[in-house]
Amino acid sequence: MMSSLDQLYQQVILDHARARHGAGPVEDVEASSHQVNPTCGDEVTLGVSLDDQGKVARLVWDGDGCSISQASLSMLTDLVAGASLDEVRAGYAAMEKMMHSRNQGVGEDVLDLLGDAAALESTSQFANRVKCALLGWYALRDAVAKLGTDIAGEQA
């Protein structure tokens, strides 16, 4: 029997997979990245542009894949739209920490930072699903790196 929290999380994931926030043609961006998950064939092209203050001014993606990868991309869009690179870096670190937790639990601070993406926590117990959930984040990391910032590294 699924707990009510699991049911809620399932619904959040399905809603995002259908809504696909940020999905659209990847054009008029400063940098883009195409990533493929060879295990299952999920793929995404994600584009990003930063404003003069180094905040995410535009993020758009186009991809195909399972509901986990599509929901994660939609959640990522909501989290980083208008965010500073420090906020993007914090979100990336929180997502990596949660997705590598093997569903052993992470702090409330991590879950709070991730918003709807916290619904993906239970997928961290399935190694093959971790790649699905992180695909968009890896595309974001690569695209932002092309603009001169490593969101996975220490701050310069």
Image: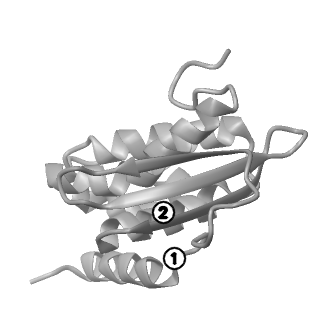
Residue 138: give its label: none
Residue at 36% in and 84% down:
11
Q: Amino acid at mark 1?
A: Arg
Disc 1: which residue:
20
Does any portion of residue 85 appear in the rendered image?
A: yes
Disc 2: which residue:
73
User: How many numbered dots are placed on residues in this image?
Assistant: 2
Q: Are marks 1 and 2 in contact (CB under 8 Å)?
A: yes
Given residues 26 and 67, the one toward you in this image is: 26
Residue at 36% in and 82% down:
14
Name the quarter where the C terminus is drawn: top right
Left or right: 21 as drawn, with respect to 132: right
The picture places residue 20, in percent across and down from the top left corner, at 51, 76
Q: Secondary structure at mark 1?
A: loop
Q: Secondary structure at mark 2?
A: helix
Given residues 73 and 2, the one toward you in this image is: 73
Left or right: 122 as drawn, with respect to 47: left
Which image quadrant for residue 51?
Answer: top right
Given residues 40 and 82, the one toward you in this image is: 40
The picture places residue 48, in percent across and down from the top left corner, at 67, 50
The picture places residue 110, in percent across and down from the top left corner, at 46, 46
